[in-house]
Image (cartoon, grey):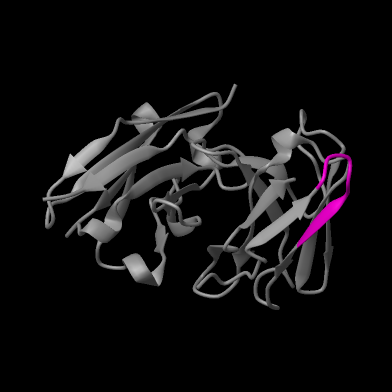
Amino acid sequence: QSVLTQPPSASGTPGQRVTMSCSGSSSNIGSNYVYWYQQLPGTAPKLLIYRNNQRPSGVPDRFSGSKSGTSASLAISGLRSEDEADYYCGSWDDRMSGQWVFGGGTKLTVL
Amino acid sequence: QVQLVQSGAEMKRPGASVRVSCETSGYTFTDYYMHWVRQAPGQGLEWMGWINPTSGATNYAQKFQGRVTLTRDTSITTGYMELSRLTSDDTAVYYCARIEDFWGQGTLVTVSS
């Protein structure tokens, strides 16, 4: 299983606000930045949030990230049908001379 | 603009090796580690390792130790991932990435007899 823990699924209706969590430990989220990726079907992951809460240019401000202790969250407000995708969190892990770890991913369904 | 362009799909027999390339442009190749990530059909992202393009130092996930080799050619700003002793469980899309931002388009590797 994955080092970071994410719920396997989440859902919401258009216009709603949804949040998804990412839980880790002191060696990863607790001491490093968290990154969030969106993966649409059949495409490569796309960076959504970097350094806990920063949005790359072009990412709508409907997407926001936060971190507290060894956990992080991704929030999507004003949910849209095109937000239906898989969402992954990732972080450096200070063990083993610095490796990267992912969560197992959350599949978001827009009802 | 930053680009990571990977080589095309591969089909391999069990026991064989595969090498995937990742040609970069739009940035200073030696300024960013290159990571490799794979995704089996219907599964999540699995980190395989990184290479420091400046020194050639590598760090591999324990699961792939002894089977994966990451290399680079700084003269052509290209990274390579070689995976040996393939089994059907290695069937996946393999990505190179500047893990904190840009990703390649992915390369499908199919292992089948």
Residue B87 rendering spot, x and y as whole percentages: 20, 59
The secondary structure that most of the magenta stretch takes on is loop
User: Is residue B68 at least partly visible in the picture?
Assistant: no
Residue B93 falls in which quadrant of the image? top left
Which residue is depicted at the point 24% across and 43% down? B19
Residue A17 rendering spot, x and y as whole percentages: 88, 49
Residue A55 rendering spot, x and y as whole percentages: 79, 40
User: Is residue A73 at least partly visible in the picture?
Assistant: yes
Residue A33 falls in which quadrant of the image? bottom right
Asked if A35 appears above or below B106 in the picture, the reply is below
Residue span colored magenta: A13-20
Which residue is depicted at the point 39% across and 53% down? B40
Tell me, yes or no, whether the highlighted magenta stretch contains residue A15.
Answer: yes
User: In the shown orientation, is residue B16 left or right of residue B111?
Assistant: left
Which quarter of the rendering shows the N terminus of chain B?
A: top right
User: In the shown orientation, is residue A74 left or right of residue B111?
Assistant: right
Asked if A8 appears above or below B38 in the picture, the reply is below
Asked if B16 appears above or below B3 in the picture, the reply is below
Which residue is depicted at the point 38% across and 45% down? B94
